[in-house]
Amino acid sequence: MSRRREVMLWTAQRATAVVLAVCVVVHLVTIIYAVRGGLTAAEILARTRGSIAWGTFYSVFVIAAAVHGAIGLRTVAAEWLGIRGDVAEVGMSLAGLLLTIVGLRAVAAVVA
Amino acid sequence: MTTASEKPGPAPVPTLRVAVWRGGAEGGRYQAFDVPRLPSQTVLDVVTHIQRHLDPTLSYRFACRVGMCGSCAMMVNGAPRWTCRTHVDNVAADAALELAPLANLPVVKDLVADMGEFFEKWARAQGHFKGAATRAEPFAVVDPATAARREADAGIECIGCGVCYAACDIVAWNRDYLGPAALNRAWTLVNDVRDTAREERLEAVAGDAGCHSCHTLMSCTEHCPKKLSPTRAISGLKRATWSLAIAAVEEA
């Protein structure tokens, strides 16, 4: 069981890294494009509010970042703090959940 | 005029300043020695000179002296090396050497590291061959040109010196990490068509301190005196454990 978990976590982190690579590029290109005429909240909201495309894109971005970051934090806990096993698993899950909630809340704030 | 008594003598023998770690598990310090520098001198020659001529209480480990047995590895100027095949000329640029027992292992005394945990991890990684044939059966014929055998052959020359283990940062950070040598050994067996414990072994190397803990820093590959690539072996294990997990999911 724990063996398969390692394989799945490792796979999830690699897969989310691929997703993040694409998301970061799109995000950066959008930033560079968006600030050409000056950066205003009104302009950002005009682009994102009610947009299913941007809402979906940033939701995927948030979930990928939450999964990727949480698994990474588990490794940091093991290697730097010596924390492994159940405590690390619970900590990882909470960190992932927190990042997902906070991230999706931010997405909702600019899309809804 | 030069008289007979003023004749210049033989050129002074250049010396090597050697700092050698002395002490046991409870701690220790570096002790300085001056060793005559000789042509084609190896680091092991230096250590042997110290023990035979300067301080017979110095403990160190060696056996074959020709790079086969893997027992003389130690830290040389901060890097793990097999000392019998390491020429002083190549590592002591300013005529100074600092010798210490292999990193990431407990010290027994002076330059002798306790290799116990290193080999226990080979056992934990199922690093032993498990076959189905009996001695009554003929020799198995294994085609050396097959992809699996080539993978096995790429890692088979490991002499178990512990250099990769001492070079590995993950071992330093996670004391349970199986380490490059044990995982390299497991990969050679995973690719051995005669072996019958493939799944068991892949399970053994996929724990939370197994092959997935490797960050691909490649220190093992960089330092391996046999020029093997445990990094490649570990990548192979990651792929193989992934295939096994996917197969299990598909069966379920």
Image: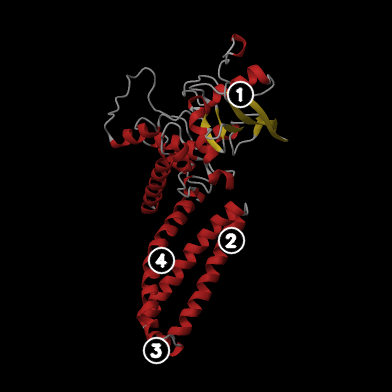
Residue where numbered disc 3 is placed: A46
Residue at the front extreme of this rendering = B1
**Alpha-carbon span between mark 1 and mark 2:** 57 Å
Q: Are marks 2 and 3 in contact (CB under 8 Å)?
A: no
* Residue toward you, B140 or B170: B170
Pair 3/1: label in front: 1
At x 41%, y 71%, the residue is A60
Across and down, in percent, residue B176 comes to 58, 43
Pair 2/4: label in front: 4
**Alpha-carbon span between mark 2 and mark 4:** 24 Å
**Alpha-carbon span between mark 3 and mark 1:** 78 Å
Residue where numbered disc 1 is placed: B35
**Alpha-carbon span between mark 2 and mark 3:** 39 Å
Residue where numbered disc 4 is placed: A20
Across and down, in percent, residue A37 comes to 38, 86
Q: Which of marks 4 and 3 precedes in the sequence? A: 4
Q: Are marks 4 and 1 in contact (CB under 8 Å)?
A: no
Dot 3 and dot 1 within a common chain? no
Q: Are marks 1 and 2 in contact (CB under 8 Å)?
A: no
- Chain to which the residue tagged by mark 2 belongs: A
Dot 2 and dot 4 within a common chain? yes
Across and down, in percent, residue B84 comes to 51, 24
- Amino acid type, callout 1: Val
Residue where numbered disc 2 is placed: A90
How busy is the neighbourhood of tag 1: few (under 14 within 10 Å), some, or many (20 plus)? many
Q: Which mark is residue B154?
A: none
* Residue toward you, A105 or B160: B160
How busy is the neighbourhood of tag 2: few (under 14 within 10 Å), some, or many (20 plus)? few
Pair 2/3: label in front: 3
Q: Which of marks 3 and 2 precedes in the sequence? A: 3
At x 51%, y 33%, the residue is B91
